[in-house]
Image (cartoon, grey):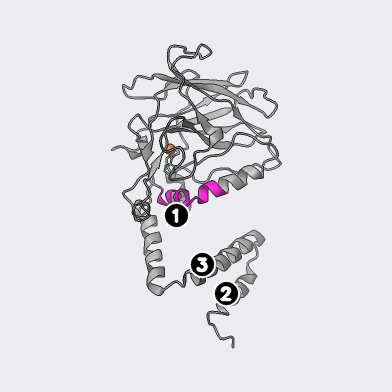
Amino acid sequence: MLAIDETTITEAALAQMESTPDPRLKEIIAALVRHLHAFAREVDLTPEEWLNGIKFLTSVGQKCTEFRQEFILLSDTLGMSSLVNAMHDRRALEDGTKSSLLGPFYRQDSPTLPLGASIAGKGKQPDTVIYGSVVNTAGEGIPNASVEIWQPDDEGWYDLQKQDPSQMDLRGRFYTDSEGRFYLKSIAPTGYMIPMDGPVGDMIRAQRRHGYRPAHIHFVIGAPGYREVVTALYLSGDPHLDSDTVFGASESLVVSVNPHDDASPYPDLKSIRFDFQLAALAGEAESGRVGADPSQILQKAAH
Ligand code: BEZ
Ligand code: FE
């Protein structure tokens, strides 16, 4: 019989998993086991420390509800979501707009609104127009592309963080016109601290990180025959652009808020303009979403 000890355990675990019929599952779990074991050896992990890790992950799971996704927050704050996004972009046939984080505040069933509508509800006066085009890599407009948008309010809160999180605000879905253009009204968002009242917040404080995200607006953009892009636009001048707690801000996604813009469909409002470029689809659609509506993740986990 094999003696299980520090030098044999990794091979023993891998050998037992050899029976996995799904080759991709087998590859992923084998690599996970090898790297987990290497990590434990590298830090000479003690039982107490591993138990603390297990308690931490347990509390991450306990914090999840249909309106809150603490695991996405963990993935984001560890840089894992941005790494997976960058590898997803690298697999594209063509270079399109760079991906950024979906984050924990996406909702799948936001209202479809006509072009020009405001996404700012409940007495908020829209003062900003967000407009541009969805184009292919040749610069041609893509008609009828779906533009999903969501953002925090001018104090940095998403609707999902409000007293009644079932009430939607500052989100919507638009479809581009026959030339690929979109335009809508909103308010300019501010930067905000990621949710710090859970185990991920405890981790961020233990690491003496500030916990802030620079001001940004989220988008999921898609059209038949093109690769969906999950991204965000970051407002220039924000003090946390270079130290985003979740590593989503990136140079090519920084936009300025223009106080007056004659080219805007609403020249009297402040404007943010951006053209999103979609890469052609290479065969099967591959999801670029690191995350989902929190309620969907909970439903899938229950199965
Ligand atoms: C967000 O941008 O909505 C977000 C992303 C990662 C963590 C927290 C919030
Ligand atoms: Fe956000």
Disc 1 element: helix
Q: How crowded is mark 2: few (under 14 residues within 10 Å), some or many (20 or more)?
A: some
Disc 3 element: helix
The reply to whether residue 281 is in sight is yes
Disc 2 versus disc 1: nearer the observer: 2
Report the disc number at residue 10.
Answer: 2
Q: Quadrant of residue 120?
A: top left
Q: Are the residues tagged 2 and 3 within 8 Å (C-beta)?
A: no
**Is the residue indicated by label 2 positioned so its CB lies within 8 Å of ligand 1?**
no
Foreground residue among 52 and 29: 52
Q: What stretch is highlighted in magenta?
A: 69-83
Q: Tell me, yes or no, whether the highlighted magenta stretch contains residue 82.
A: yes
Quadrant of picture, ligand 1: top left
Report the disc number at residue 302.
Answer: 1
Quote the CA–CA distance across marks 3 and 1. Answer: 30 Å
- Picture residue at 35% right of the left edge, 45% below the top: 195
Task: Pinpoint residue 6: horizontal percent, then vertical percent.
Answer: 53, 79
Provide the residue designation for mark 3: 39
Q: Measured along the vertical axis of the image, is residue 244 above or below residue 167?
A: below
- Picture residue at 59% right of the left edge, 77% below the top: 12
The reply to whether residue 220 is in sight is no
Task: Pinpoint residue 43: horizontal percent, then vertical percent.
Answer: 47, 69
Q: What residue type is labelled 1?
A: Ala
Disc 3 versus disc 1: nearer the observer: 3
Which SS does the magenta portion mostly show? Answer: helix
Q: In which quarter of the image is the N terminus?
A: bottom right
Q: Which amino acid does label 3 sit on?
A: Phe
Q: What residue type is labelled 2?
A: Thr
Sequence order check: which comes first, mark 3 or mark 1?
3
Disc 2 element: helix
